[in-house]
Image (cartoon, grey):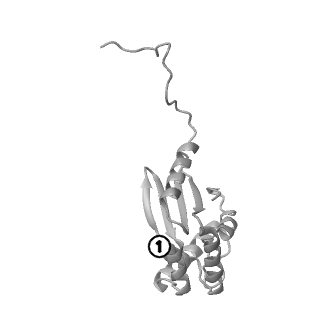
């Protein structure tokens, strides 16, 4: 069988590698948003070649204002970061597109848990506080004041951007929806 050593003069390659992962990440994000229902938080974790993680977050129709309302209710009720972990784990619908993880959170379900005062397991909450205290000690930072847990980090655009702003090891993106 003959071996083609060069493209014929009239051939045009359809795809050429560019090293730019952006279009693939954007296509996954657009597909996830299109598949999610209204009033949904969509979180996408994209592993990077250097081992870091790029996080995308966006809200479908009506999701941003509802999520900001959820944050106000959660903070008024004194919910903390462990409650946030438990509630978002409870509501998450996780899919994978290759190595990219997509989590959708129907915000009406999150609101019901927040309004219900869901706090999660006290045993796990205490373990999470110990984990954070140990991490602070190893990093030379002061531990968090009692009970040792940060406040509710948020599900809405207002708190999401404020919380994410201080995370230097993770690249953050907002899909602008």
Q: What residue is rendered at 50% in x and 12% in y?
A: 9
Q: Indicate the quadrant containing the C terminus: top left, top right, bottom left or bottom right.
A: bottom right
Return the residue nearer the eye: 154 or 132: 154
Q: Quadrant of residue 171?
A: bottom right
Q: What residue is rendered at 55% in x and 46% in y?
A: 50
Above or below — where is 133 with respect to 42?
Answer: below
Q: What residue is rendered at 50% in x and 31% in y?
A: 15
Q: Whole-percent x and y of residue 6? A: 46, 14
Return the residue nearer the eye: 60 or 105: 60
Is residue 11 toward the left or the right of residue 176 in the image? Answer: left
Q: Indicate the quadrant containing the N terminus: top left, top right, bottom left or bottom right.
A: top left
Q: Whole-percent x and y of residue 81? A: 58, 76
- Can residue 154 be seen at all in this image of the molecule? no
- The residue where tag 1 is placed is 91
Total marks placed: 1
Return the residue nearer the eye: 63 or 117: 63
- Give the SS element for disc 1: helix
Q: Quadrant of residue 145?
A: bottom right
Q: Residues within 10 Å of mark 1 (few under 14, many from 20)?
A: some
Return the residue nearer the eye: 151 or 87: 87
Q: Quadrant of residue 83?
A: bottom right
Above or below — where is 134 with respect to 112?
Answer: above
- Can residue 110 be seen at all in this image of the molecule? yes
Q: Whole-percent x and y of residue 82? A: 54, 78
* Residue at the limit of the structure toward the left, as seen here: 1
Q: What residue is rendered at 47% in x and 80% in y?
A: 124
Q: Whole-percent x and y of residue 125? A: 51, 81
């Amino acid at each position: 069988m003959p071996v083609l050593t060069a493209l014929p003069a009239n051939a045009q390659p359809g795809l050429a590698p560019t090293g730019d992962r952006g279009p693939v990440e954007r296509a996954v994000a657009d597909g996830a948003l299109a598949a999610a229902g209204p009033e949904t938080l969509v979180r996408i974790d994209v592993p990077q070649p250097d081992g870091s993680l790029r996080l995308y977050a966006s809200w479908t129709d009506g999701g941003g204002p509802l999520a900001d309302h959820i944050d106000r209710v959660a903070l008024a009720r004194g919910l903390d970061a462990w409650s946030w972990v438990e509630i978002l784990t409870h509501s998450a619908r996780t899919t994978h597109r290759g190595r990219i993880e997509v989590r959708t959170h129907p915000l009406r379900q999150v609101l019901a848990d927040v309004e219900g005062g869901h706090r999660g397991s006290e045993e796990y909450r205490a373990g999470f506080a110990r984990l954070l205290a140990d991490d602070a000690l190893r990093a030379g930072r002061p531990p968090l004041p009692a009970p040792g847990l940060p406040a509710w980090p948020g599900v809405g655009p207002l708190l999401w951007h404020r919380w994410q702003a201080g995370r230097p090891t993770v690249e953050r993106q907002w899909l602008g929806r």
